Every structure is written in structure tokens, then in C-alpha cells.
């Protein structure tokens, strides 16, 4: 077993409070360089320091802050076990770092930072909208959004920034359609979504930016409750079907989670995925053929290899237990490196290389267990449709700059590339 319970520990709630505050502080700009490596990359590859940490075991102590230990998990099997173990680990940080005494939009919440039973109560609202039948109904909308983005690229060619014209345009259009976002509000909505994962300036900017987006959605929910007017979509349906049981902050927070999970991460995945594909012409030709089984292999391997979400939400140990081979105490923070887990050579000897022919199921790119991304299958649909459409429309697509000039995010929870100039061919 990757996680073994040792003994009950009294006073763990106070330890947990300290630990969670410290976990958030680790994202600070002032964090020493030697503990920033889980949030850094070398292009799309992990930095050398992550591999060096793995050499010391699947679980290593990342740092110690005011007596609280922060552990880093890099091994795939241990990562999967930790993510699935909601009995031993807590995710709820709302009362501790969410500034609950401030305005509702400034509070931390959503599915990623809630524990049972509140987590199940909230997740039940969203799950019906992400069934296979509901998702199948979205395929025509995804096709249209992708076609519009490809037309826009052609109109602005022969050289364009793929990040702006495609990487962001496709997932933003899809998520706005899913939510039922009015056209008049979309530009403002997009601007508010920037900088949600960028840690270069510390955590304060993230909280402030997140508060702006959440308040925007909370206001939309409140307006829809008073006077139904939104286009048919997730926002309108949540208010109509769950309005009596959930307040505006809860429904707005859920909508914000859908936006966050379906926009920024997919945008990074499309842009970084295209960059990888341009270096692997065989996989690019596979997408041009469009055979479903082959396309699925390419997409699954891209999810593993790129894995733009670098770390999972921090877990806090509820009790003393053994994680991997390390004794973890109640209140310790455990951070799972998704990047590290996906590149674990113990799971796959060629893990450092991109090879769709050896793609395996079980990616952790969407998380695992109770907190696995509710929109994972929608993201897969989007990636398959967008990448096939791009490869077929522009089969001779190529990079329009020196690869050394590409600028990737320096310190971020969601890794990305700032711009990707391409020549349409």
C-alpha cells in the first residue's frame, strides 16, 4: 500500500490550520529557488531538479516551515494512491486561507478545495451536465468553434500566433457556449480570466484576479435568478434547477470552477500540444488521417507528456500515516507533482519521450479519485476535434521563429507558452 495509517493524532486540526497557511505561502514570489522546481519546466520537460528529487525516492521532503513539513510526491503509484485517499487527506482550506471575513467572491471554494459531504453536494449539481449523452450534444458546437478559429487563422495568415488565434480561442468559445455566456459579456469575461495560475508575483494577484472572475459570475447568477434572460446553458439551468437549494455564491463558484478547468488548462494543452506535434511529424500525419483509435492514442500521450497542470491541490494529512516509504504526520502538507508522476520511469521506461505507440491509460492530467476533473471527457473531445481540425486544415504548419525564442511560463501551476508563432504553409 502506498499510504498506511499509523495512529490517530490529537490536535491535528490546529496543525492542519498552520499547514494550510504555509502551503499557500509556498507559492510566494519569495520562495527560495530550491523549492520552486515543481512549478517550473524546461520547455515541456520537467526541470533537472525534479529528476534529482526522484532519485531520492517517490516521496521527498520539499521544505519545512515553522515546524510543518511539506512533502513532494513524484512517483506515479504513490501519486495515484494519495489522490484517491480522501479518508487520510483533506482538501478543504476555505476557512483558513479563503479570507472568509471578506466579500463572498474573495473566498476560496469550489470542488477542488472541499471535502465530503460538501463536495458531493456540490458535485451532484454539475455531474448531470457532463454525462456522455449531454456531451454528445455539444459536439456540433465544438465543431463550429474549431471551424471558426481555423477560418480566423487563415484570414490572419500566413503567420499567426497560435496561442491567441487557436489555443485560447477554441476552449474559450466552447466554455462560453457551455455556460451560456452572452456575447456582450465574453470579452470582459476573458480579460478577467488571465493570470489565474501565474505565481511570479506571488499569491495575492491570483486571489484578486480570481475574486474578479467569481464576482462576475456571481452577479450573472443573481441577475438570472431575478430575471431569467441568459441563453440556454449551464448557468441558466443551474439557476432554474438548483436555485432554491443553492445561493448565488455557491452557483457562481461552481460556474467559475467550470470556466477555470475548461479554459486555461485546455488553452495550454492545445498550444503546448501543437508545439510537441510540430516536432513529431509521424504523430502529425496520424492526426491528418483522423482515424479515431489512432487520434485517441495521440491525445492520451499528449496529456501524459505535456500535463499542463503541474501540481494537484495540496493535501493535508488528517492523521499520522506512511506515504510511500516516508512517515507523514498529521497536519503535514503533501503536494503531488503531476508532471513528475506522468514522467515516472518506474511506470514506463520511455517516460521521458513522446511516443503515442506506447501510450498507456491512467493519465493523471485530470487528477484522480474524488477530485478528478468533472469535465475530463469534454476536454478530450475538444482536444481531438481541435487537433485533427488543425492538422487537416494546415498540414504544412510550421514554427515561424527560432525555438530558442519561445517564452514559457516561469513559475505557474498551469504551465504554458506565452506565444507560438506559426506559418500556415
Image: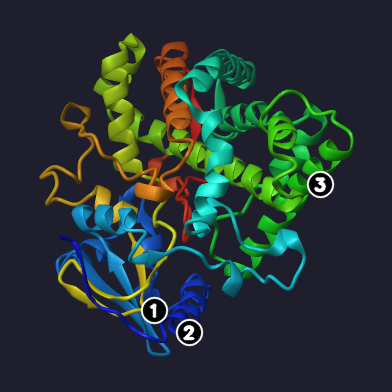
Q: Residue at x 49, y 70 (%)?
A: 27
Q: Are marks 2 and 1 in contact (CB under 8 Å)?
A: yes
Counting from the top left corner in percent of width and height, residue 320 is at: 28, 78
Q: Position of residue 87 (x, y in %)?
A: 35, 62
Which residue is at a point 39% across and 57% down the rendered structure image?
311
Q: Is residue 313 above or below residue 239?
A: below
| Residue on which the image places disc 3 | 219
Q: Residue at x 39, y 47 (%)?
A: 404
Q: From mark 2 to mark 1, how far is it between C-alphas? A: 8 Å
- Say which label, 3 or 1, has the lower sequence index: 3
The quadrant in which residue 384 appears is: top left
Query: What's the distance in space between the residues labelled 2 and 3, CA to CA?
Result: 35 Å
According to the image, label 1 marks what residue? 331
Q: Secondary structure at mark 1?
A: loop
Q: Are marks 3 and 1 in contact (CB under 8 Å)?
A: no
User: How many other residues sit within 10 Å of disc 2, few (<14), some (14-19) or many (≥20)?
Assistant: few
In front: mark 2 or mark 3? 2
Q: Within the image, what quadrant is residue 275 found in?
A: top left
Q: CA distance from mark 3 to mark 1?
A: 36 Å
* Quadrant that contains the N terminus: bottom left
| Residue 129 located left or right of residue 216 | left
Colouring used for the render: rainbow
- Residue named by callout 2: 14
Q: Is residue 233 above or below residue 14?
A: above
- Look at the image and tell me whether residue 285 can be seen: no
Q: Label 2's element?
A: helix
Please provide percent x and percent y for residue 60.
Answer: 23, 72
Q: Earlier in the sequence, mark 2 or mark 1?
A: 2
234 displayed left or right of 123:
right
Amino acid at each position: 500500500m502506498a499510504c498506511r495509517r499509523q495512529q490517530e493524532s490529537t490536535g491535528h486540526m490546529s496543525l492542519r490550520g498552520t499547514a494550510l497557511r504555509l502551503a499557500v505561502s509556498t507559492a510566494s514570489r519569495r520562495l527560495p529557488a530550491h523549492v520552486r522546481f515543481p512549478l517550473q519546466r524546461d520547455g515541456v520537460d520537467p526541470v533537472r531538479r525534479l529528476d534529482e528529487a526522484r532519485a531520492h525516492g517517490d516521496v521527498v521532503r520539499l521544505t519545512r516551515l515553522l515546524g510543518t513539513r511539506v512533502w513532494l510526491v513524484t512517483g506515479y503509484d504513490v501519486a495515484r494512491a494519495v489522490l484517491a485517499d480522501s479518508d487520510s487527506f483533506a482538501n478543504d482550506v476555505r476557512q483558513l486561507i479563503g479570507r472568509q471575513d471578506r466579500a463572498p467572491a474573495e473566498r476560496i471554494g469550489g470542488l477542488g478545495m472541499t471535502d465530503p459531504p460538501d463536495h458531493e453536494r456540490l458535485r451532484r449539481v454539475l455531474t448531470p451536465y457532463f454525462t456522455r449523452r449531454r456531451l454528445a450534444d455539444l459536439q456540433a458546437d465544438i465543431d463550429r468553434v474549431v471551424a471558426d478559429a481555423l477560418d480566423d487563422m487563415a484570414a490572419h495568415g500566413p503567420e499567426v500566433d497560435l496561442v491567441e488565434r487557436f489555443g485560447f480561442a477554441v476552449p474559450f468559445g466552447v466554455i462560453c457556449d457551455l455556460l451560456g455566456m452572452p456575447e456582450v459579456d465574453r470579452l470582459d469575461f476573458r480579460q478577467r480570466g488571465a493570470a489565474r495560475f501565474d505565481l511570479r508575483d506571488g499569491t495575492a494577484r491570483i486571489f484578486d484576479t480570481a475574486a474578479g472572475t467569481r464576482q462576475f459570475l456571481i452577479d450573472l447568477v443573481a441577475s438570472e435568478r431575478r430575471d431569467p434572460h441568459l441563453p440556454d446553458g449551464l448557468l441558466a439551468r443551474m439557476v432554474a434547477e438548483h436555485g432554491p437549494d443553492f445561493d448565488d455564491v455557491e452557483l457562481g463558484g461552481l460556474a467559475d470552477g467550470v470556466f477555470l478547468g475548461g479554459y486555461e488548462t485546455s488553452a495550454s494543452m492545445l498550444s503546448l500540444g501543437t508545439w510537441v506535434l510540430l516536432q513529431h511529424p509521424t504523430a502529425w500525419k496520424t492526426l491528418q488521417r483522423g482515424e479515431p483509435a489512432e487520434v485517441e492514442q495521440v491525445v492520451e500521450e499528449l496529456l501524459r507528456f505535456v500535463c499542463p497542470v503541474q501540481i494537484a491541490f495540496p493535501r493535508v494529512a488528517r492523521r499520522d500515516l506512511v506515504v510511500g516509504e516516508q512517515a507523514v504526520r498529521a497536519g503535514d502538507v503533501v503536494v503531488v507533482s503531476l508532471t513528475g508522476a506522468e514522467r515516472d520511469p518506474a511506470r514506463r521506461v520511455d517516460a521521458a519521450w513522446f511516443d503515442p505507440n506506447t501510450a498507456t491509460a491512467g493519465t493523471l492530467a485530470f487528477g484522480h479519485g474524488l477530485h478528478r476533473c468533472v469535465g475530463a471527457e469534454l476536454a478530450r473531445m475538444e482536444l481531438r476535434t481541435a487537433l485533427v481540425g488543425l492538422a487537416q486544415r494546415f498540414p504544412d504548419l510550421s514554427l515561424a521563429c527560432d525555438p530558442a525564442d519561445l517564452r514559457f511560463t516561469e513559475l505557474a501551476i498551469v504551465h504554458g507558452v506565452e506565444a507560438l508563432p506559426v506559418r500556415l504553409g
